[in-house]
Image (cartoon, rainbow, N blue to C red):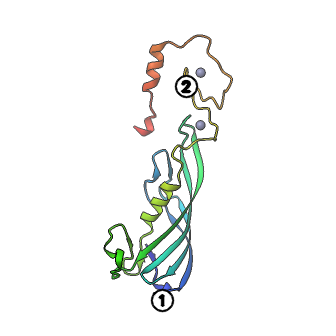
């Protein structure tokens, strides 16, 4: 929750806010997320407008995840941009009845839904350890980026190949 009291409500009034807050749980997508409790650095500009407070800025955080092709751990950073109008509670303007609109709660505004939306929108649909990750060998499951030239003389036993298809990461169990 961010207190907007010092901003006041005179349209045109502006404040800059920089602060760090711990990441909420489950921020991101399953394969790429901001670790729970890790620092999220906000750089915000708050601007009072007629209907409420316009919030513009960015949030920067660490990311961890797995490559969609080879399952190698990924460590990266995200910078999520956002802009959102938080309408005053008592405002009953045209879209005041709209349930999708973000509202101030008194002088407080809740950044968490905004942060979640912008992080998810910013994340790549399929995270990769490197842009041209060659993935895993279809025969033995080796990570091809580590061993791009390896070959198989004999086709692998199909029963073994089937077992590999059932393999899964116990951490995601
Ligand atoms: Zn990879
Ligand atoms: Zn192989």
Callout 1: few (<14), some (14-19), or many (20+) C-alpha neighbours within 10 Å? Answer: few
Q: Is 90 positioned to the left or the right of 143 in the image?
A: left
* Residue under the image location 53 percent in, 86 percent down: 13
Query: Upstream in the sequence, badge 1 or badge 2?
Result: 1
* Residue under the image location 62 percent in, 11 percent down: 153
Asked which secondary structure carries label 2, the reply is loop
How far is mark 1 from mark 2, CA to CA?
A: 62 Å
Quadrant of the image for the C terminus?
top left
Q: Which of marks 1 and 2 is in front?
A: 1
Above or below for 61 versus 160: below
Callout 2: few (<14), some (14-19), or many (20+) C-alpha neighbours within 10 Å? Answer: few
| Outermost residue, bottom side | 10
User: Is label 2 within 8 A of ligand 2 (CB to nearest ligand atom)?
Assistant: yes
* Residue under the image location 46 percent in, 49 percent down: 29
Using the image as rendered, state which of residue 57 and residue 4 is in the foreground.
Answer: 57
* Residue under the image location 57 percent in, 41 percent down: 73
Above or below for 160 versus 60: above
Q: Residue 10 got which mark?
A: 1
Above or below for 71 versus 36: above
Q: Position of residue 102 (x, y in %)?
A: 39, 71
């Amino acid at each position: 929750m961010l207190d907007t009291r010092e901003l006041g409500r005179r349209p045109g009034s502006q404040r800059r806010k920089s602060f760090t807050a711990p990441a909420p749980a489950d921020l991101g997508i399953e394969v790429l997320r901001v670790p729970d409790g890790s620092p999220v650095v906000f750089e915000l500009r708050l601007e009072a407008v007629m209907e409420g407070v316009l919030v513009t800025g960015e949030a920067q955080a660490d990311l961890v995840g797995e490559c969609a092709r080879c399952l190698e751990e990924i460590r990266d950073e995200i910078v999520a941009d956002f802009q959102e109008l938080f309408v005053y509670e008592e405002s009953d303007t045209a879209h005041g009845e709209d349930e999708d609109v973000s509202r101030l709660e008194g002088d407080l505004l809740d950044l968490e839904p905004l942060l979640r939306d912008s992080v998810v929108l910013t994340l790549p649909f399929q995270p990769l350890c490197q842009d041209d990750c060659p993935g895993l060998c279809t025969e033995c499951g080796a990570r091809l980026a580590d061993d791009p030239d390896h070959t198989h003389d004999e086709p692998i036993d199909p029963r073994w190949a089937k077992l590999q298809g059932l393999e899964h990461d116990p951490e995601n169990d």
